[in-house]
Amino acid sequence: MNKHFYLLILGILLNFNWVAAQTVMVSNNTLGQPAVYTFTYTTSQAIGTGTSAPNVFYMSLPSGYPAISPVVSGGSNLNSYVTFKVNGVAYPCSASFGSGVGGSWASGIQLSTGGANPGISIPAGAEIQITVSGLITNPSSYGIYNFTWRTSQGNGATVQNFSSPLNFSLAAAPTVTVNNTTPGQPAAYTFTYTTSQAIGTGTSVPNVFYLWLPSGYPSISPIVSGGSNLNSYVTFKVNGTAYPCSASFGSGVGGSWASGIQLSTGGANPGISIPAGAEIQITVSGLITNPSSYGTYNFMWRIAQSNGASVQDYNVPLSFSSTLSTGETNKTKEQIKVYPNPSADYIQLSGITAKEAYGIYNLAGQRILAGNISQDEKINIEQLVKGSYIIRVGLKTFNFIKK
């Protein structure tokens, strides 16, 4: 037996199947709303036209998701709903997949080259990216939903299984982002979080935002009495819609002081009622100055009853050691790198030793993409608009630019 035989056996034993990435990313995580889903995976063998595995994508919707709509017969008729790419090159569904098999139905999507003209042959090791828009609606409940899909033979026998969890839990929602990381300089801070119950006007929970500044931060300045008077310093949004502080919060409670900020609907006219599951975004500018020392600072805030009793607590670390893009000399800050940066189509991470959950946020603090990533896997960013973004990996955050 030659060395190639032993390498083959070793590959089988270790399951070397060339899978560099299997991720699911969603364009927005608003419950019950339509969203764009992107599936990225790598095939371990040749599939498609001319092979015994015509089923390039066979996805079953996780339990708890609304039914896919509309129902479309035949993968070739999914041009309006599916963008299909192999190694970064787009191919139309009309030419790649058959009209007599697959398509979309209530609980799944199938793309098969069976009967396609001319079809498509996909080599082993190719990266496949399928972006689905206008078919899938987000679930109505928080939780972790496990997406499963496969490549398979014409009779449905599995060739390769893929699985990727997608987190719609409240634990993944709270974020803190900062528009610049220069020590000792004023900066705009954006807090994004989701409420698990109805809060604000007409409820027993008037305190929409009660923030304590982390130890090590300079005092907040200026001091402003009453949340209604914070129009010049706070942009307040619920599910993406801006509401003025002057109309949303009371003048006799809250405001800003040396170590915190409070926004309460108590005494507000007309106030604001915020439903359970709503995403709240609060951008504070002109009040908070960055700390003078590098390190990780733990931001804590809560929604609370009028007596201060907590209803829901949020806790997010913000690192000033890993967000710097220039002048880094500390080797621990260089362990993880985002590259290429800037990039037009994908980014990768070096320096991570195990699969990590990640989230990509815009500078307003909104989560745009999420998934899991391992060393040197690719994250597709083609669908992002040009501009600056933040990627969060575990407790660390990094800036990158989509060009």
Image (cartoon, rainbow, N blue to C red):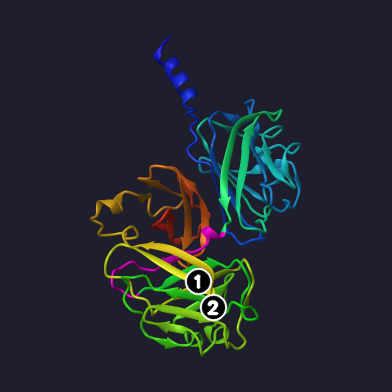
- Please tell me which of labels 2 and 1 falls first in the chain: 2
Mark 2: few/some/many CA within 10 Å (<14, 14-19, 20+)? many
Tell me the distance, in whole angstroms, between the alpha carbons under discs 2 and 1: 8 Å
Q: Give residue 80's position: percent from left, percent from top.
A: 68, 51
Residue identified by numbered label 2? 207
Q: Is residue 371 left or right of residue 332?
A: right
Q: Are marks 2 and 1 in contact (CB under 8 Å)?
A: yes
| Relative side of 21 to 130, left or right | left
Residue shown at 43% from the left, 59% from the top: 390
> For this rendering, which residue is in front, 207 or 75?
207
Position in image of residue 142 (x %, y %):
62, 57
Q: Give how far across and how far down residue 138 sits, in percent.
A: 65, 56
Q: Please identify the quarter of the rendering in which residue 286 is found.
A: bottom left
Is 160 rendered above or below residue 26? Answer: above
Task: Residue under label 1, please give it.
Answer: 302
Task: Look at 64% across and 25% down and name the residue there.
Answer: 52
Q: Which residues are magenta?
A: 170-186
Which residue is depicted at the point 57% across and 83% down? 265
| Residue 86 visible | yes
Q: Amino acid at mark 1?
A: Arg
Q: Residue furthest top?
A: 1
Identify which amino acid the numbered label 2 is placed on. Asn
Relative to 359, 29 lies left or right: right
Q: Quadrant of residue 328?
A: bottom left
Q: Quadrant of the N terminus?
A: top left
| Residue 132 disc label | none
Residue at the (44%, 79%) spot, across then down: 261
Q: Residue lying furthest left in this view?
A: 329
- Quadrant occupied by the C terminus: bottom left
Near-viewer residue (138 or 253): 253
Q: Is residue 185 magenta?
A: yes
